[in-house]
Image (cartoon, rainbow, N blue to C red):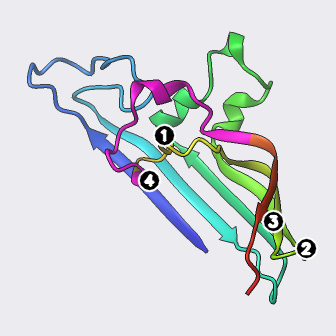
């Protein structure tokens, strides 16, 4: 599978101010300015018990929304955190032939917090709430085994 995603927006302020900051949000934070909030491209190969037990997911992203993914330089969790914000996903998977199937995934993947997504296309209300501005949308490591039904 492969695809692209483009999120552009223009938030119009009736007071017609310049491109002011709006609400201190980490995304969609400028008024009266056309913004490329997120531009993303990806390629994915799903695991399959008959064709190939190996799979991967890789994608790149850019835009003003990705700037909010990385804390200020003094708080960077990794030396390359500013570069990592441009990776949408970068992981590999293997389907183990155990029981109904167990899929092991390692690398960079979406977090388990399922209330909302970083990408507006996955959010019913387009923008995220304030409480979700400071949650980890992506995780780097090994995902525990997940049940995969083999058919």
Q: Estimate the spatial distance between the alpha carbons at disc 2 and disc 4, rounded to whole Å.
A: 32 Å
Residue 54 image offset from top left, x and y in percent: 84, 73
Q: Which quarter shows the N terminus?
A: bottom right
Residue 65 image offset from top left, x and y in percent: 47, 35
User: Can you tell which mark lies on residue 137?
Assistant: none
Q: Estimate the spatial distance between the alpha carbons at disc 3 and disc 4, rounded to whole Å.
A: 23 Å
Q: Quarter-wise, where is residue 79 in the image?
A: top right
* Label pair 1/2, CB-CB below 8 angstroms: no
Looking at the image, is mark 1 or mark 2 nearer the viewer? 2
Asked which secondary structure carries label 2, the reply is loop
- Depth check: give the residue in front, 93 or 79: 93
Asked which secondary structure carries label 4, the reply is helix
Looking at the image, is mark 4 or mark 1 nearer the viewer? 4
Residue in the image at 40% along x and 48% along y: 123
Of callouts 3 and 2, the N-terminal one: 2
Q: Estimate the spatial distance between the alpha carbons at disc 3 and disc 2, rounded to whole Å.
A: 9 Å
Residue marked by disc 3: 103
- Depth check: give the residue in front, 108 or 72: 108
Residue marked by disc 4: 122
Residue marked by disc 1: 63
Looking at the image, is mark 3 or mark 2 nearer the viewer? 2
Q: Where does the magenta region start and end? A: 121-139
The relative height of residue 5 versus residue 77 in the rendered view (above or below) is below
How many residues crowd mark 4 within 10 Å: few (<14), some (14–19), many (20+)?
few
């Amino acid at each position: 599978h492969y695809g692209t995603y483009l999120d552009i927006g223009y938030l119009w302020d009736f007071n017609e101010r310049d491109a002011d900051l709006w609400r201190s949000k980490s995304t969609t934070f400028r008024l009266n300015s056309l913004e490329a909030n997120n531009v993303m491209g990806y390629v994915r190969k799903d695991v399959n018990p008959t064709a190939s037990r190996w799979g991967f997911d890789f994608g790149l992203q850019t835009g003003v929304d990705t700037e909010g993914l990385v804390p200020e330089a003094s708080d960077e969790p990794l030396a390359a955190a500013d570069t990592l914000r441009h990776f949408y996903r970068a992981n590999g998977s293997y389907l183990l032939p155990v029981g109904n199937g167990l899929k092991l995934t390692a690398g960079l993947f979406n977090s388990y917090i399922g209330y909302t997504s970083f990408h507006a296309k996955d959010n019913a209300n387009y923008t995220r709430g304030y409480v979700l501005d400071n949650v980890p949308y992506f995780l780097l490591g090994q995902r525990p085994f997940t049940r995969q039904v083999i058919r």
